[in-house]
Image (cartoon, rainbow, N blue to C red):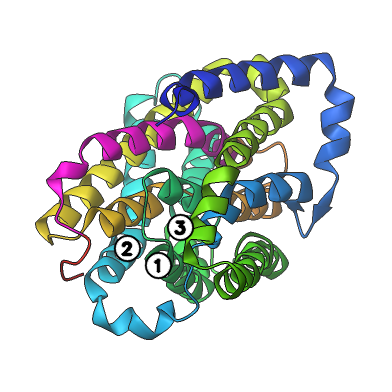
Amino acid sequence: MGAFERYLSIWVALAMAAGVALGVAAPGAFAHIAQWQWARVNLVVAALIWLMIYPMMLKVDPSCFRDVGKKPKGLALTLVVNWLVKPFSMAGLGVLFFQVVFAEVVPAAEAQQYIAGMVLLGVAPCTAMVFVWSHLTGGDANYTLVQVSINDIVLVFAFAPIAGLLLGVTDLQVPWDTLLASVVVFVVVPLSAGLLTHRWLRSHQGPAAIEALAARLKPTSMAGLLLTVVLLFGFQADTLIEQPGRVLLIAVPLLLQSYGIFALAYGLARWLRLPFEVAAPAALIGTSNFFELAVAVAISLFGLSSGAALATVVGVLIEVPVMLSLVRFANRTKRWFGPADSVT
């Protein structure tokens, strides 16, 4: 690991500060960039995420889906944590903190809004950034792709019923354009580019050329991560400056949820004796969120200036630093897990 990667958390902290400073100094520029959207997916952020995940997509073997049935444990873990645990634990923490712990400092109407935003985050597991976290832990690119793909299929059918149940909303409308656009932008496009490059390099220069290109692109991937952080914090600079107290209150249960879900998934992965290359991405998928979808639904249901929308935005802001801390922990505990050829 190079010096840059070793101090990545520091660089991210500086990027967060730079984003807030630039957002305050040039709000018009960030407002302009925020308008570059397709189905509420910001295209500038999408391009930066492509930079981050393209090196991992290079390593994907097109035949990986044929072996799914041979390695069910990692997939089962991801599905159980994402759909049977995470939404309900998020709702429970929301109720605990905003109806009990913070009941005297947060008005009841606002508390309900914050709980709703947390629920939407809990029912929207990650689609894009998980490839970055998997890459940083040396995860199995093929298996991560399969995990994300199956998760996306379940998301199509399970998001509305579970969110509607927990929110008490019977006519919840899923923004299908955002959901489908996100899958295309964050999975199909970079995966197609990676597969085409993989095939060409393998046939013309051999397998070693694929690893060499992925290694050369790693600095570009890290630059994409830092620029994404600058943009996300720049977009929300006003919120951070004007409502720091509310942001901190919302962040408390979100942090507990993130670390708690990771601990559960990572512990189960160790109990199931999964190899680290599968265990780390499986735990990180459950911890990370599909924030584009959560923010879009919060705005459509409750409005742009609602507490629900604010809660989903706080989820966006804490995600990168939290996930980097978990990546660091996973890499330090790699020895807890078995070799890559163990049964998964």
Task: Inspect the magenta stretch and tell me whether residue 313 lies in it.
Answer: yes
Q: In this view, does 96 lie above or below 246?
A: below
| Main secondary structure along the magenta-highlighted residues | helix
The residue to which callout 2 is attached is 78
Quarter of the image where the C terminus is located: bottom left
CA gap, disc 1 and disc 2:
7 Å
Q: Do the residues labelled 1 and 2 touch (CB within 8 Å)?
A: yes
Numbered marks: total: 3
Q: In this view, does 141 lie above or below 16?
A: below
What's the magenta region? 311-339
Mark closer to the chain start, 3 or 1: 3
Q: What distance separates the C-alpha of mark 3 from that of mark 1?
A: 16 Å
Work out whether residue 200 or residue 180 is closer to the camera in this orientation and state it: 200
Q: Find the distance from the CA under tag 2 to the CA under tag 3.
A: 13 Å
Which mark sits nearer the N-terminus, 1 or 2?
Answer: 2
Task: Say which element carries label 3.
Answer: loop
Q: Which residue has dot 3 on it?
A: 123
